[in-house]
Image: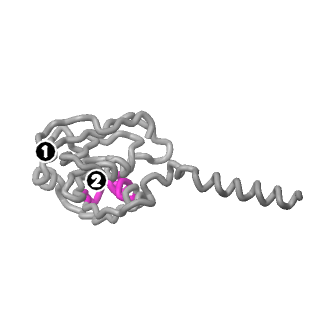
Amino acid sequence: MKKIVLILVGLLGLTLNSYAADPVWLEGKTDKQYEITVYRSASCGCCKGWISHLKDHNFSVKDVVVNDVNPHKQRLGVPSKAASCHTAEVNGKVIEGHVPAQDIKRLLAADNDIRLLAVPGMPSGGPGMDTAGARKDSFTVYSMDSQNRVESFNQYSDY
C-alpha cells in the first residue's frame, strides 16, 4: 500500500510540475527564432553584451562592425533623442539601444504599425549593461509608429 501511495504522489508531482510556467530566465528563449542585424562599433563592449543577450533569447544575430553607426541610424530614421550606441534591423523594424529581447519579440508577434523600439542612452543594468555589481537604473522602452508618434512600450524599474 505504501508503494502505491508513493507512486501516486510522485505522479501527482510530475503532473503539477508540467503545468508550471517557464522560469523567468527562460522567458523568450524557447520560442520562434528571428534574424536580426546589429550595427555597432568595434570598441563597444556593451554592444557585445546586448548581442549575447539576443543570442541567449534565440535570436540569430548578424553582427556588423562599422566605423560610424550614425549613417545607419540616419538611413533607418532613428531620431537623435532616441540614440544609443547600436542600431538593429529585424523583420522591417528598427531597434535602437538596449531594448530587452522579450520586448522585440512582443513587437514582432503583434499586428501593429510600430516601426521602431528604442531605449535612449545607456541605462545601467539593462541588457548588455548588466555587468556584475552595476547599479540598476529604471528605463523605458519607447515605440514610434509609422506616423512618428512616440509612446511608452514598456517600463522597467529593476531589469
The quadrant of the picture occupied by the N terminus is bottom right
Q: Quadrant of residue 45?
A: bottom left
Residue tagged by mark 2?
A: 108
Q: Secondary structure at mark 1?
A: loop
| Structural crowding at the residue carrying mark 1, measured as other residues with C-alpha within 10 Å and reported as few (<14), some (14–19) or many (≥20) | few
Q: Earlier in the sequence, mark 1 or mark 2?
A: 2
Identity of the amino acid at label 1?
A: Ser
State the image coordinates of residue 129 (x, y, percent, origin top left): 39, 46
Per the model, the C-alpha gap separating discs 1 and 2 is: 15 Å
Residue tagged by mark 1?
A: 146
Identity of the amino acid at label 2?
A: Leu
Residue at (50% x, 48% y) in the render: 24
Residue at (33% x, 38% y) in the render: 154
- Is residue 146 magenta-colored? no
Instruction: Specify whether 73 is left or right of 5.
Output: left
| Structural crowding at the residue carrying mark 2, measured as other residues with C-alpha within 10 Å and reported as few (<14), some (14–19) or many (≥20) | some
State the image coordinates of residue 98 (x, y, percent, origin top left): 32, 47
What residue span does the magenta drawing correspond to?
38-52
Q: How is the image coloured?
A: one colour
Q: Quadrant of residue 18?
A: bottom right
State the image coordinates of residue 103 (x, y, percent, origin top left): 34, 47
Q: Nearer the viewer, residue 86 or 29?
A: 29
Residue at (33% x, 65% y) in the render: 60
Residue at (23% x, 59% y) in the render: 91
